[in-house]
């Protein structure tokens, strides 16, 4: 009876269908196929909604290898999406995230505009950069950071660069971010200095770089911090180094 039912399913007549619907093929006979949308998999059986609105349940071993590979890929995507959502939720509750929430801005033409880091990323690590428009060494080094961000870090969902401005006024911060071509967010001096996690590690001199994990722990400083940030952005996991 099962064989007869499967034969009927694979003999279904095809009509035009939306993109979510694909062709499913019998493992026993490649000439037998039908179009439908995968709606679930349970106990080694796939539930597929046919174009006539009816759903059929087919044992995975009765589907072609291509179909089984497709289902495996769908399962993997769902698992990765679930993991990404979980990581994003965790990232938003970290100490650094709490300190940045509502404080970050991005350059928008000639003004600073509120920017929500977590609308685009779920950072697990932050490369924190202190610099200012009046600082000569900052102006010499910042363009290299901007280039590294654009080429290596911008596309990462788990690493973000944040500029903690050391300019006392907004005009100076805007001028510096514009001149240095910063495409990453920043926090005005008056705001980051009120956040304990940043105030506690404020450097004595600038420019200064620190790589932090989501809890605010310093992973690396200086050039090492930039190097590790790029490695993390590329999916590498460098050995954690205590800050000197």
Image (cartoon, rainbow, N blue to C red):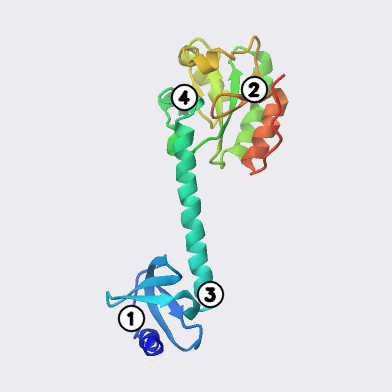
User: Which disc is residue 66 wearing?
Assistant: 3
Residue to which mark 1 is pinned: 15
Residue at mark 3 to residue at mark 4: CA–CA distance: 46 Å
Verify CB contact (< 8 Å) between mark 4 and mark 2: no
User: Which disc is residue 100 wearing?
Assistant: 4
Label 3 Cα neighbours within 10 Å, binned few <14 / some 14-19 / many ≥20: few
Q: Quadrant of residue 135?
A: top right
Name of the residue lying farthest toward the left: 53
Verify CB contact (< 8 Å) between mark 2 and mark 3: no
Q: Nearer the viewer, mark 2 or mark 3?
A: 3
**Does any portion of residue 110 appear in the rendered image?**
no
Q: Earlier in the sequence, mark 4 or mark 2?
A: 4
* Residue shown at the point (64%, 33%) measured from the top left: 229
Please name whichever residue, 110 or 224, is drawn nearer the observer in this view of the structure: 224
Residue at mark 2 to residue at mark 3: CA–CA distance: 49 Å
Side (left or right) of 14 relative to 208: left
Q: Earlier in the sequence, mark 1 or mark 4?
A: 1
Side (left or right) of 134 relative to 9: right
Residue 203 in the image, given as x and y percentages of width and height? 63, 13
Q: Quadrant of residue 146?
A: top right
Residue to which mark 2 is pinned: 209
Q: Earlier in the sequence, mark 2 or mark 1?
A: 1
Residue at mark 4 to residue at mark 2: CA–CA distance: 17 Å
Residue at mark 2 to residue at mark 1: CA–CA distance: 60 Å
Residue 16 in the image, given as x and y percentages of width and height? 34, 77
Verify CB contact (< 8 Å) between mark 2 and mark 1: no
Q: Nearer the viewer, mark 3 or mark 1?
A: 3
Verify CB contact (< 8 Å) between mark 1 and mark 4: no
Q: Quadrant of residue 150?
A: top right
Q: Earlier in the sequence, mark 3 or mark 1?
A: 1
Mark 2, secondary structure of its residue = strand
Q: Earlier in the sequence, mark 2 or mark 3?
A: 3
């Amino acid at each position: 009876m099962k064989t007869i039912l499967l034969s009927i399913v694979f003999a279904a007549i095809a009509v035009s269908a939306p993109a979510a619907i694909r062709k499913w093929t019998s493992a026993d006979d490649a000439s037998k196929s039908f179009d439908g949308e995968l709606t679930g998999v349970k106990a080694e059986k796939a539930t597929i909604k046919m174009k006539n609105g009816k759903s059929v349940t087919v044992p995975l071993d009765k589907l072609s290898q291509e179909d089984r590979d497709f289902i495996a890929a769908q399962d993997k995507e769902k698992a990765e999406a679930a993991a990404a959502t979980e990581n994003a939720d965790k990232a938003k509750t970290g100490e650094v995230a709490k300190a940045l929430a509502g404080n970050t801005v991005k350059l928008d033409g000639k003004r600073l505009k509120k920017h929500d880091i977590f609308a685009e990323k779920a950072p697990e690590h932050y490369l924190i950069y202190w610099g200012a428009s009046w600082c000569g060494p900052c102006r010499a080094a910042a363009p290299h950071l901007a280039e590294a961000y654009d080429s290596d870090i911008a596309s990462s969902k788990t690493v973000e660069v944040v500029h903690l401005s050391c300019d006392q006024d907004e005009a100076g911060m805007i001028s510096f971010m514009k001149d240095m071509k910063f495409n990453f967010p920043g926090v005005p001096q008056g705001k980051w200095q009120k956040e304990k996690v940043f105030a506690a590690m404020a450097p004595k001199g600038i420019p200064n770089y620190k790589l932090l994990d989501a809890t605010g722990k310093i992973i690396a400083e200086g050039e090492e911090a930039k190097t590790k940030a790029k490695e993390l952005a590329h999916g590498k996991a460098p050995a954690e180094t205590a800050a000197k």
